[in-house]
Amino acid sequence: MSPFEHGEVFVLDDGGEVDLDLGNYERFLDIKLTRDNNITTGKIYQSVIDKERKGEYLGKTVQVVPHITNAIQDWIERVAMIPVDGKDGPADVCVIELGGTIGDIESMPFIEALGQFSYRVGPGNFCLVHVSLVPVLNVVGEQKTKPTQHSVRGLRGLGLTPNILACRSTKQLEENVKEKLSQFCHVPAANIVTLYDVSNIWRIPLLLQDQKAHEAILKVLNIQSIPGEPKLDEWVARATMFDTLQDTVRIAMVGKYTGLSDSYLSVLKALLHASVDCRRKLVVDWVASTDLEDSTKIEAPDAYKSAWSLLKGADGILVPGGFGDRGVQGKILAAQYARQNNVPYLGICLGMQMAVVEYARNVMNLSDANSTEFDPNAKTPCVIFMPEGSKTHMGGTMRLGSRRTFFKVADCKSAKLYGNVDYVDERHRHRYEVNPDMVPEFENAGLQFVGKDESGRRMEIIEIPNHQYFVGAQFHPEFKSRPSKPSPLFVGLIAASSGQLGKVLQDCLSDHVIPAKHQLNNGPYMPAVHQNGHAKKLPNGLSNGTYYPNGNGVHA
């Protein structure tokens, strides 16, 4: 039986204008997606090739239609049966993002597959929302509908007819513009909604609710019998509170790809979640790690001076992950500055590894300490290649996915932030790790490895005990951060950077019962217990310039 005989399909075609990745769906809908929920071209082609190798096509010529398109449809049907909200039984509605600009050759098989799929499941079981841009020409201030007309025409020519238009624009659509879009795109005016610029991203669902987008979707899917209005009270409170935040917290983001902020989108979201949880207005100072290095002091002294000025002016420092040796020395210098000046520091993946290298060089006086990623012949290899990895086949050889980390030091800051649990499950994405043979030397020198895997050979979390907040994580805690449940390690960074860490840690150990979802307001900070894993019993219970808000806090 097809799952869509008792469920519906909701397809969001982003038209190439808006990127709604899996992480965003998880954050907005409070669901837990897996790798199977991400249907990529490579996965589909690989599955078809594997079937052909096994002889499942009985020697027939393998073609895009029907083999690739059928594989896409089969994948959707299979994954739609797997619950993602923690409840039993298949979901009532399956949400699919059809990414890519209409007309791109890469998305053609997916468009054809969904065209066939819409015909197969029939009316009332398929709703297509087309997201498109309605630009405003600054010269005349007029909203232009031609881009949307062309994209809808191309979509219809490929076999898909949009039921709802979600129009991205700087301001609300004028009525005559809606009427024009309705006439030329063959979509009822009531099914045309505007996604115009708002003060913060959390107002987007409220914007859609105000325009009754949910009613239009329910009508197309013929499930209007579902009672009740969306329960968005907490969401409204969070969006409202965000706009009233006054006290700022400055975080220096030291990375290699600062020219494109989307490279660190998940990290930015996690910072935003934590800053709101701590009642602080986030200000991100982008610091290119290469600009901190001595070579830049000679080649571009102004960039060098500006980078160090931003780093020294920040309340906290975050060094995210990355690959390759460019800018690595700058990350080491950032970790050194944070350690020596008691500045809150969070290192993620490579950021943790470079903190370990820095500690070895400047505290343990091992001047030749390095990672074998950057020096394969390092005399003191603090970070080494994973033994089960392949140095020749790079694709799919990383330590990926959810892995378990056990806390080895009960009273460390990380364990307290997670709610004094025995272990946590966090997502990984790396090929190199701290050399386990050097761990005793590090620990004798004062560096604590407070989190390890089940074997005790993989170092997952580091801390410097006498530092205000110096934490490194081999995993990527940003991947599991949510608006209502920010990542504990990010909360620790923001709390330490705004002078609240003592209060947070104290409340985690006090006899006071801390509510998991505290009331949102702009008053005193009330921390939540962030629980992840098998819990013990809880104690009772882009450049330096003008600021501009963009829904991800404030960038400087």
Image (cartoon, helix red, strand yellow):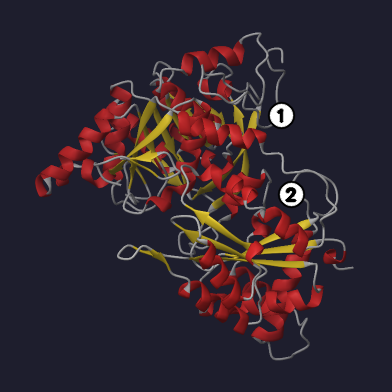
Q: Residues within 10 Å of mark 1 (few under 14, many from 20)?
A: few
Q: Decide which of 298, 543 is in the foreground and name it.
A: 543
Distance from disc 2 to disc 1, alpha carbons, whole Å, reads 20 Å
The amino acid marked with disc number 2 is: Val
Q: Decide which of 129, 292 is in the foreground and name it.
A: 129
Q: Which residue is mark 1?
A: 534
Q: Decide which of 32, 56 is in the foreground and name it.
A: 32
Q: Residues within 10 Å of mark 2 (few under 14, many from 20)?
A: some
The answer to whether residue 352 is left or right of residue 97 is left
The amino acid marked with disc number 1 is: His
The answer to whether residue 405 is left or right of residue 248 is right
The disc, 2 or 1, on the residue closer to the chain's N-terminal end is 2
Quarter assignment of residue 131: bottom right
Q: Mark yes or no: residue 365 visible.
A: no
Considering the numbered disc 1 on the image, is that residue within a helix, a strand or a loop?
loop
Q: Residue at x 62, y 37 (%)?
A: 235
The percent coordinates of residue 148 (x first, y second) are 51, 72
Q: Is 35 situated above or below 362? A: below
Considering the numbered disc 2 on the image, is that residue within a helix, a strand or a loop?
loop
Quarter assignment of residue 74: bottom right
The percent coordinates of residue 99 (x first, y second) are 56, 66
Quarter assignment of residue 230: top right
Q: Which residue is mark 2?
A: 84
The answer to whether residue 158 is left or right of residue 413 is right
The percent coordinates of residue 321 (x first, y second) are 42, 45
